[in-house]
Image: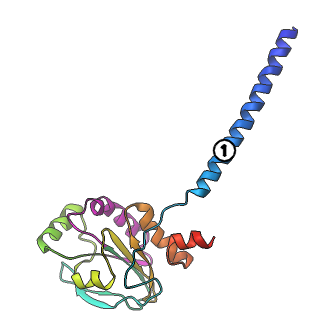
Amino acid sequence: MSMIVVSQVLLWITVAVLGVLVAALARQVGVLHERIAPAGALTLHQGVKVGDAAPEMHVKSLSGDAVVIGGARGRSQLIFFLSPDCPICKTLLPVFKSAAAAERGWLDAILASDGDEAAHRRLMMAEGLAGFPYVLSEDLGRRFGVSKLPYAVLIGEDGKIASLGLVNTREHLESLFEAKERGVASFQDFLAKR
């Protein structure tokens, strides 16, 4: 009978030690999670900055509709710069479409690029992008300082640039919305101020 008691005591001590180890590991995971901050869209050195008035432009979409970019409109605009030759751009298109649908109550989503119109029309048909204004304008990319793709610019309701940056993942694209909501230039700026 004393062996049973001893074995039970040893088992309970083992369970207690394992509980302490699990709590210590959980704490370490939490510390690591705080140290590794979520990634936001990378803001590159460009001519326009967050808070600047967005250049107002009147352009035509591939479907022939007039599109106004910038200006105080009462709604935000997300301009997603892409290329038919960019594999990352193509993998982000479902994310772009999902974000545009989820945020359609306050956001107008626009696709933008330059180059061969036929290639862009093929991309538009292959990816099901007919529901979005698709603009071809080299001047548009230059005015926003787009040097790498995929790139996105979020213009606020007041016509000012709310956030912008290189977007390679869903998290990068969503960080533009977070930066606008929190009133910071980028997600990195938010983390630095914290």
Q: Is residue 108 magenta?
A: yes
Look at mark 1 in the image and give the residue it sits on.
26
Q: Is residue 79 magenta?
A: no
x, y (%) of residue 191?
58, 68
Res 151 quadrant in image? bottom left
Name the residue furthest left: 118
Query: In this image, 151 relative to 74: left or right?
Result: left
Amino acid type indicated by mark 1: Ala
Res 133 quadrant in image? bottom left
Identify the residue at image location x=35%, y=66%: 96
Count residues near mark 1 (Cα–Cα under 10 Å), then give few for <14, some for 14-19, many for 20+: few
Identify the residue at image location x=75%, y=31%: 17
Relative depth, front residue between 143 and 72: 143
Identify the residue at image location x=26%, y=90%: 58
x, y (%) of residue 114?
20, 76
Where 93 falls versus 135 (above or below)?
A: above
Res 161 quadrant in image? bottom left
Which residues make up the magenta segment?
Answer: 81-110
In what quadrant of the picture does the N terminus appear? Answer: top right
Identify the residue at image location x=64%, y=51%: 30
Where 29 falls versus 122 (above or below)?
A: above
The secondary structure type at the circle numbered 1 is helix
Relative depth, front residue between 95 and 12: 12
Name the residue furthest right: 2
In what quadrant of the picture does the C terminus appear? Answer: bottom right
Name the residue furthest front: 45
Query: In this image, 141 relative to 165: left or right?
Result: left
Query: In this image, 92 relative to 103: left or right?
Result: left
